[in-house]
Amino acid sequence: MNNKQQVLSTDVLVIGGGIAGLAAAVTIKETDSNTDVLIVEKQTTGYSGKANRGGGVLQYFDFNRVDPMEFVGYHANAVGCFLGDQEQMLRYVKMNNQMIDKLIEWGVKVPFNEDGTLKIIPTGPMTGMIGVDLDITLQVRRTAEKKGVKIIDKVTVSDLLTNNNEIVGATGYSLLDGTFYVIKAKSVILATGSQNYRVINMWSNGRGDGIAAKPS
Ligand SMILES: Cc1cc2nc3c(=O)[nH]c(=O)nc-3n(C[C@H](O)[C@H](O)[C@H](O)COP(=O)(O)OP(=O)(O)OC[C@H]3O[C@@H](n4cnc5c(N)ncnc54)[C@H](O)[C@@H]3O)c2cc1C
């Protein structure tokens, strides 16, 4: 309690500066540039998260060959995704190529053929892969900052704040000097990733914080 304290306010608080948090933040700014968006990241936005210098490939669907429903059916029935959110998977397939266009717009480099079409590596009857800029998250961070997204790094969010059962912000602390943060927000986006602690050193930050976050 003797530590320094900071109270901040924002329209939208994004917890986690991986690709999901960054994409959400940029999309909000593109929808309404007057909305205040703040990303709070426990490591360093642009360098943290699993998309940074990971596999380096993006899935691409040739919609002349892929029926999104067929893709979902195959994954639900033959791959083991039956208990997953099948509607979410359908949305993902339908929006996949749109997402790639957005990443290109946000500065991520992907390879093109001489005729201007995307260089696709065929990987199966339904999918192809595109090799992608290994600094994918860093490029999106730069775009986010250009659009006015505020970013606080090295702050771990520890709890969500609630009022009458509504989430109204979060608390956290600086990993550098222990400063305790109270962040009030009209909306909160939890983009803290999956639980992937110990999968590989690079992803050691993914400890399921979002999954474990309980309103208090
Ligand atoms: C081994 C492996 C290989 C992969 N290869 C590919 C691939 O080739 N192509 C592909 O498309 N996908 C690949 N993926 C999947 C892809 O990397 C992930 O789906 C994607 O990066 C998830 O992004 P995210 O923003 O949801 O989560 P994350 O990338 O995990 O980002 C979450 C962020 O939240 C921060 N955070 C967590 N808790 C807190 C907290 N309490 N307070 C503040 N910040 C917090 C973390 O530090 C992190 O920066 C791979 C995944 C793995 C594990």
Image (cartoon, rainbow, N blue to C red):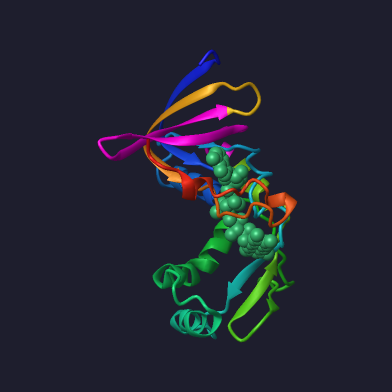
Residue range (magenta): 144-173
Pick the quarter of the image with the C terminus. top left
Residue furthest toward the left? 164
User: In percent of the image, x 58 and y 83: which residue is there?
Assistant: 126
Task: Please check the rendered image and state whether residue 62 is part of the magenta-colored stretch, yes or no.
Answer: no
State which quadrant residue 173 falls in.
top right
User: In percent of the image, x 71 and y 68: which residue is there?
Assistant: 112
Q: Is residue 97 above or below residue 208?
A: below
Q: In this view, does 172 lie above or below 55?
A: above
Q: Whole-percent x and y of residue 134?
A: 73, 55
Q: Is residue 25 visible?
A: yes
Q: Whole-percent x and y of residue 44?
A: 65, 38
Report the front residue among 121 and 5.
5
Name the side, left or right, on which 193 lies relative to 88.
right
Q: Whole-percent x and y of residue 14?
A: 48, 41
Report the front residue among 20 and 143.
20
User: In percent of the image, x 51 and y 35: which residue is there?
Assistant: 157
Q: Can residue 18 be seen in this view?
A: no
Report the front residue among 125 and 164.
164
Question: Taken as a whole, is the magenta stretch helix, strand or loop?
Answer: strand
Name the side, left or right, on which 127 lies relative to 5.
right
Report the front residue among 82 and 21.
82
Q: Is residue 83 above or below residue 192?
A: below
State which quadrant residue 132 falls in.
bottom right
Q: Whole-percent x and y of residue 36?
A: 43, 34
